[in-house]
Image: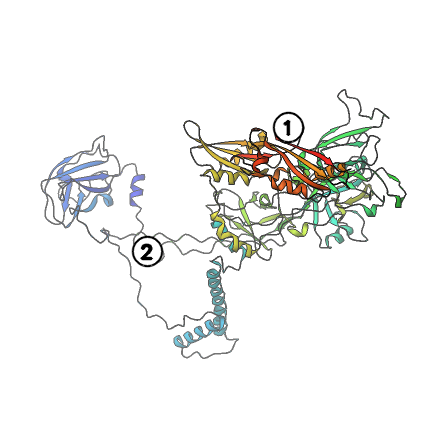
Amino acid sequence: MIYFCSQKNRRALVLQSANLNGIDYLELVGMSVCGKQLAVTLLKDARSIALTPANIVITGGTAVTISSITPATDENPFVFIVNLEQTGDFSSYTLSLVAAPGITDPPAGFDPQLSSVDFSFKVGCPTPADCLLDTCCPAPVSAPPDINYLAKDYEGFRQVMLDRMATLSPAWQETHAADLGVALVETLAYAADQLSYQQDAVSTEAYLNTARSRISLRRHARLVDYIIGEGCNARTFVCVGAGKDNLLIPAGALFYVRVPGLPLAAKLGDPVAQQLAKANQPVFASLQDTTLFQEQNEIHFYAWGDTSCCLVPNATEATLAGNLTTLKTGDVLVFLEKCGPLTGDPQDADPTHRWAVCLTSVSTTDHLGNVLVDPLNAQLITRITWSQDDALPFPLCISSVTDAEHGLIPVPAVSVALGNVIAADHGVWIDSEQLDIVPPAPAAPPAGAGCQCGTQAEASAPRPHYYPELANSPLTFAVPFTGVQTASAFLASDPAEALPQVGLQSDDGSSWTAEKDLLSSDDTDHVFVPEIERDNSIFLRFGDGQYGKFPDAGLSFLATYRVGNGNIGNIARDSLAHIVLPPTFLPPLAEILSVGNPLAASGGLDPEVMDHIRQYAPFAYQTQLRCVTENDYGVAAAGFPGIREARGTLRWTGSWYTAFVSVDPAATFTAALASDTTRRLNLLRMMGTDLAAEGAVLVGLDIEMEICAAANHFQGDVFAALMKLFITGNQCSGQAGLLNPANFAFGQTVYASPLIAAAQAVEGVLSATLTVFKRMDNPSLDGAAQGFLTMGRLEIARCDNDPNRLDHGIFVLHMDGGK
């Protein structure tokens, strides 16, 4: 070996050559400690090479004699064997390939640098040291300077440097601030102070309990799979009155909170729009194009000639006056009490009697295609329906007669339906904000500079620090809008599904997408993560070249994002009163007759505060995300939407276990609910276990009571009072009725005493006796005698008293006494 080189490239160069071969490595063959066969592996095929003992020279230690050469075979085309008459000692040996005895040049076709190899016969002898020598250049030894390493601030660093200068240059005594030396010392002291602060910050931000940055807490929480809440924007419905038909309100139209003295409509860029923007109030934007019609400004209900009518609770259909051909499935209507039913005064209208529904069907013709009319008077009508999810939660008065104090005057339209409803959410877009240019990477040390020892690799060039900040905040997080399926679901969106409303466009033509994290991204994905600090400032973190692409140096970005988020967007009803339309809006602004949100905005949620993250993140890993036992399946299913309670049961089904999940639904057990439950549980189930979702076993109860009414009470009044108590819905007080399905749970024993006590407490009841208390599937069990009825583990008691479903229970009162 002539040279010691840290980077050995010769082998790769010979492999690329078409005419050269060389030795790759040598192995001692044989099970004994001192073998007599040397296996020489070449870089390329050795079968065409004819070597004799005269072409092999072995030097070093005790001389050895070569007896023969075993050429390469088809099984090992790169290996030939050198057979020795005796083994060597423990010295270092060198095997060389030569053209002929006495000639140092290698045979034809062999590389001079790879024609020899060092080896040893000491096979199997353990050694505590590495056999490969590591040759390096030692650094010159110098005395360490006397420095105060406890200095941590500007003054401390400045004094250390001045003291060091006094040691290195005793003749330098300058103290004036304008001196170049003093200026350099103070500049370096400032830089050192900043670095010291960063060191302290690193140790502070390294722990959940001491971190002062919300971004640090976000990253700590992510380590234990805790996703912090970034908040969510609010949503509402806006009703816009139209002065003409087919008035198109485009997506992105802005709605502003009422500002006295300003007109209700303006165009973007107008002085009015600029004044509204300066009001510093939540701004809402329409989510889709909406076409307005005059007939939908205010729609009256049709009561078929009856008076003093109301739309009952849980209603899912109604009849409207007029042939409303502009209404269609998917439109939203807002039911609103327009005036007080007892006074007829708009000031007495109950503002809580407002409800939005999304229409599932609109009928303006009958099955023969004839226009729908009231056959009694030929009045045009329209029938509408909406889903059970939007069912009316309260009675809505349609028409009434005022009380005697107000003249007993008929009020035909106590409540109306408002059309021209626009779905809107909180936030305003900021378009094409210029971000900082990606800086070049810091200069790396030149390759090969200094002395590199052994196989130490060169340090890779560091990436530039690029962590741009958006100029405006707070960033909007919104649930993706796919249209209004039900009004209730739109207003009660899940904030966990909210996504950041920001996108980037780089000057190389690429679009960059916001993600919650970069763990599933590769080095080609144009993605980034917006990170929110405690003051709502927004920083953008890009990939590192492995998880997400790192932007190239010199690249510039334009950011388009939305600001407006959190609880501040939950504005009260009737707060919005202005609309700002794009400049391309052609109709006169006077065609906009009214703007308002009949319902309060909802869904706005502030970002999770730092203390909450500290309290909840450490327990995130304790959340069980798998089902093993029967109880696990029931607990997991009970947390799914639409399920009130669930029980799991593991049953052997022939070759494996199946987890049967019995579900007590919040409404009705349907095939869709079973499919959704199975899909969700499939992510949690144990391997080798099947899944099946089924409805709970409902056990109808047969209950009969003998009621003795007091002599001074009417029997009918007592009966009505009792039936208001023993109902499956809610009582007038808002409390659940005694027979409400929510009062019964899996396997719950039903006792007789609470039923008797409730009946006995009703005014006018002298005595209440439970005469029949049985399970309808097993009438032989006399619950009245024993005072209770037991249920199985998967059974739920029911007493709906529904004549259409007698198997779900019967409740009968036998009245006696009274007037």
For marks 2 and 1, the one nearer the N-term is 2
Q: Is residue 484 visible?
A: no
The quarter of the picture where the C terminus appears is top right
Q: Nearer the viewer, residue 184 or 198?
A: 198
Q: Is residue 676 above or below residue 523?
A: above
Q: Residues within 10 Å of mark 2 (few under 14, many from 20)?
A: some
Per the image, the residue denoted by label 2 is: 452
Circle 2 — which element? Answer: loop
Residue positioned 86% across, 42% down in the render = 402
Circle 1 — which element? Answer: helix
Q: How many marks?
A: 2
Q: Nearer the viewer, residue 288 or 657?
A: 657
Per the image, the residue denoted by label 1 is: 806
Q: Position of residue 794 (x, y in %)?
A: 52, 34
Residue 754: name its quadrant. top right
Residue 564 vs residue 456: left or right? right
Q: Residues within 10 Å of mark 1 (few under 14, many from 20)?
A: some
Q: Amino acid at mark 1?
A: Leu
Label 2 vs label 1: CA separation?
A: 91 Å
Q: Position of residue 343 (x, y in %)?
A: 85, 45
Q: Amino acid at mark 2?
A: Gln
Residue 515: name its quadrant. top right
Q: Position of residue 760 (x, y in %)?
A: 67, 42
Q: Position of residue 659 (x, y in %)?
A: 47, 33
